[in-house]
Every structure is written in C-alpha cells, then in structure tokens.
Image (spheres, grey):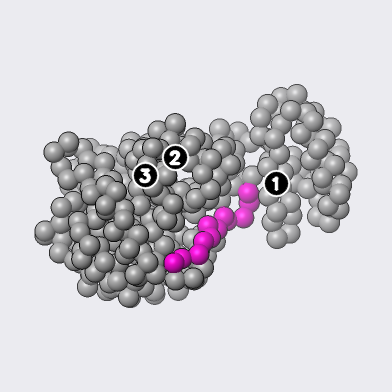
Amino acid sequence: MIIAVKRGTDAAELRDFTAFLENRGVRVHRSEGTSQTVLGLVGDTTGIDEEGLKAHHLVEKVIRVQEPYKRANRLFHPEDTRIDGTGPDGRDWHIGAGNLGIIAGPCSVEGQDQILETALAVQKAGARFLRGGAFKPRTSPYSFQGMGCKGLDLLVEAKKAAGLPLVTELMDIRQLELFDQVDIIQVGARNMQNFALLKELGRCRKPVLLKRGYACTITELLMAAEYLMAGGNDQIILCERGIRSFDNYTRNILDLSAVPALKRQSHLPVIVDPSHATGLAWMVPAMAKAAVAAGADGLIVEVHRDPERALCDGEQSITHKGFSSLMESLKKYAAIEGKCL
C-alpha cells in the first residue's frame, strides 16, 4: 500500500502519522521527493481501513500495490535512485538519476601487469569504474576459475593505481570478509536467485550490482532486488546481461526492452552488459550505444589488452584501443540523452 502525503505536512504530524500506521503492524518506508513525501506500507495491510486512510487530513492519495515487489517498486519511490560513493582518488562517483556509469576491465585477473595495464588504459579512456574477476563461475570445472585471493589483491592494487572504484563478483558469502576494499559487489547471473546470498548482502551496506539470470523474467529480477532491499540494503544496480534463446548466433539475446521496462517499474538504476549478452567483441560497440539510447544508466564492458590470449571470454572482449574509440562515441550518445558521462 502506498500513501501520498499532502504537500506542506508538518514534520511532527508526519511522525505521529507514521507511528499510527506502525501500531497497526506494518513497516513504513518513507521516501522524500522534491515536492512530496510517499509512505510505503510493507507487511499485512488487509486489516487497515483504506477508506479511513483516504479520509485522513494528511493523506492525498492511497494506492494498493499489485506487484509482489514493494521496495523496488517505483510507486514506493517515484524519483530515480542514485547510487553514490567516493573513489580511491577522492572523487565522488554516481550511477543513476542522469549519471552514466561506465565500468570496464578484463573478464578475469591473469597477472599483475595485465590488470594494471588495463586499469590505466580504461581510466585514461574515460571509464569511471574498474571491473575484473578474481573468483570466476565457469560452466566447465576444467576452465580457468580465476586467481582467487591473489587476484583480489591485484585488483585492489590496480584500483589504487588507476584511482577507480572497484567492481568484482562475489560467489560465496564466506568470501565477503575479503571484500572490504571492493566498492560495488557484483552478484552474477548464476547467483541471482541464490536467496541465502541475497539475504546476507541485504545486511551489507555496500552497493550491489545485480545481474539478471539468463532464464529469468523482469519480475524475478525485481524480486531478487527485493530480497536485498528487504534486508535494508537499498543500494542496488540492476544489470541486463542477455537472456537464453533458441538462437545460438550470439551467446545470449540482449533484451534492450528490459531497460525501459525496468525503469518504468522500478526506481533503481539499470545498466547493460553488451559483452556477455552478445559474446562477440565486434557487436559490443553497437549494443553499447543502443543501450545508452534505450535509457541505460551505465555499461559494464569487458576490455583486454590481448583478447586472443585471454584466459577467459577473449572472444567478447574489446581491445584497449577499441574501448577508447567506444568512449568517444558514447560521449555523443550521453549528450543526446542528457546524461553526465
């Protein structure tokens, strides 16, 4: 249930009204907009008299929420959410609400020289975040699984050298204590419905980049975000990374329609992964530009100094030069969309 409070409501009256609602067994999520306050009621609202609420002198409108996701629902939070932080260079960073966040780096860490060289290259080209995998979920048990803790240490070194906030994937909640210097924790497509992991990350206060499962609906993605938000973590970035289809020409099918759909249903920022979606490096620039044109709040792109020799997903990684060229193109698209790059 959503309650839109009348403009100009006194703060003391609002506190009393909130207490009145909570005494009826619901939790109240308060969202302050630029011109109006919205109260979201979470819990069993069947015992609350809707007509009585409509008659209350502080209430402008009451809306019943039909969707199963509540906190992630735009009705609960009409204005776009912006995820904020401060990078190792002391600069503030933002994703969402008009800020286009570009996350770039290799699929996996392969060595000190490799990750450092790529971190400096993507920073010079204009990326605002460094990505890289230390722990890698792979379909085959015989494939390269990442460098583990050593890889994480190398990522932190590269983060500091390039002055970029770090984005990397958490596969197991037992690894969380190792992620102190990670700025944004990535939950991969395979773990999108790992509800035990989501519950633990809900108690964490780090931003979470939540990737859509390759066979999951938009509602299922938003319900996964709801798990995180129900635990108290509202710093969520949704990521469209392609869904499974009958066509195997590309690795997955990039569902760009998910971008406006998610932004219509939710206030959370939405980014796109054109690398995993297509699995083909030559498609990445076109899909990246299309994603920005569709309204995405950012991109996560795989970049490697020598894709042919990459230990993981080299066929979908663009070169340092290719990424620099892409960034020049994206500046024009960002300007058209009215977003800060």
Disc 2 designates what residue? 221
Sequence-wise first label, 3 or 1: 1
Question: Could you tell me how far apart the alpha carbons at marks 3 and 2 are, in whole angstroms?
Answer: 18 Å
Question: In what quadrant of the picture does the N terminus appear?
Answer: top right
Other-residue count near label 1 (Cα within 10 Å), few / some / many at <14 / 14–19 / ≥20: some
Q: Closer to the observer: label 3 or label 2?
A: 3
Q: Name which of mark 3 and mark 2 comes first in the sequence.
A: 3
Which residue position is annotated with label 1? 30
Q: Mark 3 points at which residue?
A: 170
Magenta residues, as a range? 77-88
Assign a secondary structure to mark 1: strand
Foreground tag (2 vs 1): 1
The quadrant holding residue 24 is top right
Magenta stretch prevailing secondary structure = loop
- Report the mark closest to the observer, 3 or 1: 3
Quarter residue 163 falls in: bottom left
Query: In this rendering, is residue 10 above or below 69?
Result: below
**Residue pushed farthest left?**
308
Q: Are marks 2 and 1 in contact (CB under 8 Å)?
A: no
234 or 160, which is in the foreground? 160
Return the mark for residue 255. none
- Count neighbours of disc 3 (C-alpha within 10 A) and say few if under 14, some if 14 to 19, many if 20 or more: many
From the top left corner, tell me how far across and down residue 316 is, in percent: 20, 56
| Rendered location of residue 312, percent (x, y) | 18, 51
Residue at position x 66%, y 30% in the image: 43
Residue 334 painted magenta: no
